[in-house]
Image (cartoon, rainbow, N blue to C red):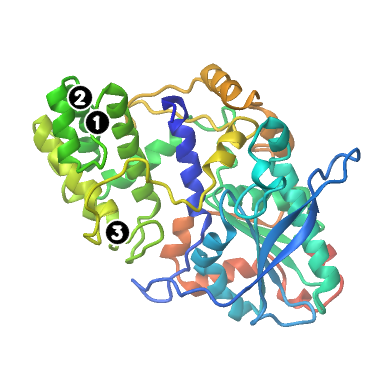
């Protein structure tokens, strides 16, 4: 992977948070397992906004109505993000947890070009011509058509209020869905949705500063140890003996042979720290890997002294990453190519990053614990042209969705994913109910009155 795309790959990992784990009913309790659902497909236009072609594809969606109260019971609609929809469905305990209380139908819609929803089958990623229809606008149109189809074909759903729910990129889609299609969804719950991570709306280093703060508050010397580890890797990788020592110490399946391999090691470690920050749950979980409760605190137990010599410091770093990759004790070696879950569509996200999802990210090694890396749009543009033959449009999302200028929109709740974990079930439920007035639940004027 080109070093340039590392921060952008880490944005892909934000999609892992698109799965909203359940709010706690009691402290330390894990999320409940999902209930049964049906897998269905809907024929969608490949191009919703042009009339020259009439090509279609099969969009996959999952539906669970065992708790749904017919005759206008609410529909919780998951705006699928960059991955296989079954994976998000099986890990989104929040929606399953509140479905019974709200008498709600659950619908999980797969995002085009991910999972099984491939507009051109095996040719979908063959070139930029086939990828031309991979945009957030086309995906939102898919969602709108799907909801209209369900209301027309499911008995008792014609006047059901629909609430869009999503996390990370899916959270952005949920918010944008409400903005662009207020007649289709009465509200949106957007969790950890970085709709300001475009242009210069926020500093490019904001995300990595947040990750660093998680480690900083989880143990004295922890973030400082990670910050010092980069120079330690650089020193040792300057010799063949040092490369051999690093390979052995980190139990790598494939030994490091040169400086390029050493750079991959650092990228692998960076991604590991980001992963850990994202799954720092207060209970044991196996969302990405089998992990203990508060895994960042467990990791930081090995990273207390940033002043150690290079080798001692990196031996401790190995012990720390071992918590993430080998908590079960079953791994014999570590494969640096296996980090993010395979259920996420990296190829599709690379293309989106190279077109409209241009989110500036950088590190400075001062306000964060990562190696310094500037945001270089020109270099990104050249890399995207080399990979896909396209150039990114950094201001398009701001023009399309408004950036911070969203005061004219209503009924959108922005929350962090961790908010769901640290608030009680009933507090989360109360917030969700704010999106539609209960007294209007059985009136045909609901969709108009709730706008």
Q: In which quarter of the image is the C terminus?
A: bottom right
Label 1, secondary structure: give it: loop
x%, y% of residue 64? 64, 75
Query: What label sits on residue 256 in the rendered view?
Result: 1
Residue depicted at x 73% and y 77%? 73
The CA distance from mark 3 to mark 2 is 32 Å
Say if residue 451 shows up in the picture. no
Quarter of the image holding residue 285?
A: bottom left
Determine whether 208 is above or below 288 in the image.
above
Residue with the most extreme front position: 122
x%, y% of residue 19? 51, 59
Q: Are the residues tagged 2 and 1 within 8 Å (C-beta)?
A: yes
Q: Where is mark 2, residue-wise?
A: 237
Q: Where is mark 3, residue-wise?
A: 294
The mark nearer the N terminus, 3 or 2, is 2
x%, y% of residue 86? 56, 63
Label 3, secondary structure: give it: loop
Crowding near the residue tagged with mark 1, few <14, some 14–19, many ≥20 C-alpha atoms within 10 Å:
many
- Is 300 on the left or on the right of 115, as rendered? left
Q: Are the residues tagged 1 and 3 within 8 Å (C-beta)?
A: no
The mark nearer the N terminus, 2 or 1, is 2
């Amino acid at each position: 992977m080109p070093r340039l795309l590392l921060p952008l790959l880490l944005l892909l990992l934000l999609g892992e948070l698109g799965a909203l784990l359940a709010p706690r009913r009691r402290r330390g309790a894990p999320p409940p397992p999902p209930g049964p659902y049906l897998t269905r497909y809907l024929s969608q236009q490949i191009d919703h906004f042009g009339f020259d072609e009439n090509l279609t594809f099969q969009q996959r969606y999952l539906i669970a109505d065992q708790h749904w109260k017919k005759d206008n019971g609410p529909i919780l609609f998951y705006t699928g993000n960059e991955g296989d929809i079954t994976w998000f469905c099986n890990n989104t305990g929040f929606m399953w947890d509140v479905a019974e209380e709200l008498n709600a139908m659950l619908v999980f819609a797969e995002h085009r070009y991910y999972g099984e929803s491939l507009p051109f089958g095996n040719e979908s990623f063959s070139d930029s011509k086939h990828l031309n229809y991979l945009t957030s606008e086309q995906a939102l149109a898919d969602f709108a058509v799907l909801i209209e189809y369900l209301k027309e074909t499911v008995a008792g759903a014609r006047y059901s209020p629909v609430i869009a729910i999503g996390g990370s990129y899916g959270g952005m889609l949920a918010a944008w869905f409400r903005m662009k299609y207020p007649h289709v969804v009465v509200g949106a719950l957007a969790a950890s949705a970085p709709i300001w991570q475009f242009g210069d709306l926020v500093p490019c280093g904001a995300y990595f500063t947040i990750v660093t703060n998680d480690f900083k508050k989880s143990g004295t010397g922890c973030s400082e140890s990670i910050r010092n580890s980069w120079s330690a890797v650089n020193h040792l990788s300057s010799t063949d003996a040092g490369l051999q020592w690093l390979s052995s110490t980190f139990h790598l399946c494939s030994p490091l042979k040169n400086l390029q391999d050493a750079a991959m090691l650092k990228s692998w470690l960076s991604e590991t720290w980001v992963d850990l920050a994202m799954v720092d749950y207060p209970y044991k979980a196996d969302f990405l890997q089998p992990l203990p409760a508060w895994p960042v605190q467990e990791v930081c137990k090995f990273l207390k002294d940033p002043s150690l010599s290079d080798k001692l410091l990196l031996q401790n770093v190995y012990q720390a990453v071992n918590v993430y990759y080998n908590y079960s004790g079953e791994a014999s070696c570590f494969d640096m190519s296996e980090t993010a879950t395979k259920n996420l569509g990296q190829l599709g996200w690379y293309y989106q990053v190279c077109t409209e999802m241009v989110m500036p990210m950088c590190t400075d090694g001062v306000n964060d614990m990562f190696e310094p890396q500037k945001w270089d749009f020109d270099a990104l543009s050249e890399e995207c042209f080399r990979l896909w033959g396209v150039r990114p449009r950094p201001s398009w999302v701001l023009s399309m969705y408004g950036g911070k200028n969203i005061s004219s929109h209503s009924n959108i709740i922005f929350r962090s994913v961790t908010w769901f974990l640290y608030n009680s079930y009933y507090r989360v439920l109360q917030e969700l109910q704010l999106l539609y007035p209960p007294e209007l639940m059985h009136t045909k004027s609901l969709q108009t009155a709730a706008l």
